[in-house]
Image (cartoon, rainbow, N blue to C red):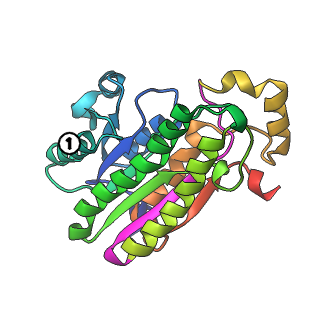
Amino acid sequence: MSILDSFSLAGKSALVTGASNDAGLCYGMAIALREAGARVAIADISPEVHKLADSLGGASAGYYSIQCDLCDEGSLAGAFANAQDIFGGGLDILLNGAGLQYRNEALTYPADKWRQIIDVNLNAMFFASQAAAKIMIPQGKGKIINVASLCSFFGSKNIPAYAASKGGVMQLTKALSNEWCAQGINVNAIAPGYMKTKLTENLVDTELGRTHTGRIPAGRWGESKDLMGVVVFLASGASDYISGAIIPVDGGYLGF
């Protein structure tokens, strides 16, 4: 078998959370998983998830949509049952990408925003991983990929809930790997750096954006396409001996 064959996801099934619009990073990663051969079900609380899957060609093109509330136990269970129905049983890949951010100084940070961000960014990730593991452990294999952040490594400023949640994602990734790796499940995380998307493009050319750019050895902000290779790698057999890793995709920012 060629080394390139080990990167193929042909015949695999993937559930992706948090990719309900083409402005986010998970959208590109969902496309990457499909282009590598996996059938992809996108789960999100927004009804726009159905339009997104249809825009990509729908079931005939290997894209499916599941509307669910990841923070609701019953809705989450229904999403995994739905995914198994779609794929005819089993699940090979879970990409935990759903996330929120809210910017405010810590002293006046709203309690409802704190709870919401911790719930979506960390609690939902754990319970989705738990649901996936209950499918994957009997299979003896599976890949769980969490979306962390540079804030998994440092606290930043004015985003205390986001930083706390993403620090938790790093440790959760390691903890789940410690328990499940011996049972054939690889649990890893991708930590995107400063990324240029439709939601952040207006920030890039501001004074703050230029300050960030000056710290990035690559000299530019990342783009969704910069995450496509690493997500395929972590979802494929090429990464079978990697687990508990948090991989920065940051243009060298953390090494500066």
Q: Vertically, is 197 above or below 120?
A: above
Q: Amino acid at mark 1?
A: Gly
Front in this rendered view, residue 57 or 185: 185
**What crowding class fits label 1: few (fewer than 14 Cα within 10 Å), some (14-19), or many (20 or more)?**
some
Q: Which residues are magenta?
A: 182-198
Can I make out residue 238 in this image? no
Say how many tags the image has.
Answer: 1
- Above or below, 110 against 47 in this view is below
Q: Is residue 58 left or right of residue 177?
A: left
Instruction: Determine the secondary structure under disc 1.
Output: helix
- Residue 69 can be seen, yes or no: yes
**Residue located at (26% from left, 68% from top):** 137
Which corner quadrant of the image does residue 178 belong to? Answer: bottom left
Question: Where's residue 129, x and y in %?
Answer: 36, 56
Judging by the rendered image, the residue that carries numbered circle 1 is 78
Q: Residue 33: x percent and y percent?
A: 40, 46
Q: Position of residue 151 (x, y in %)?
A: 66, 49
Q: Residue placed at 60% from the left, 49% from the top?
A: 164
Foreground residue among 178 and 26: 178
Residue at 67%, 45% in the rendered image: 193
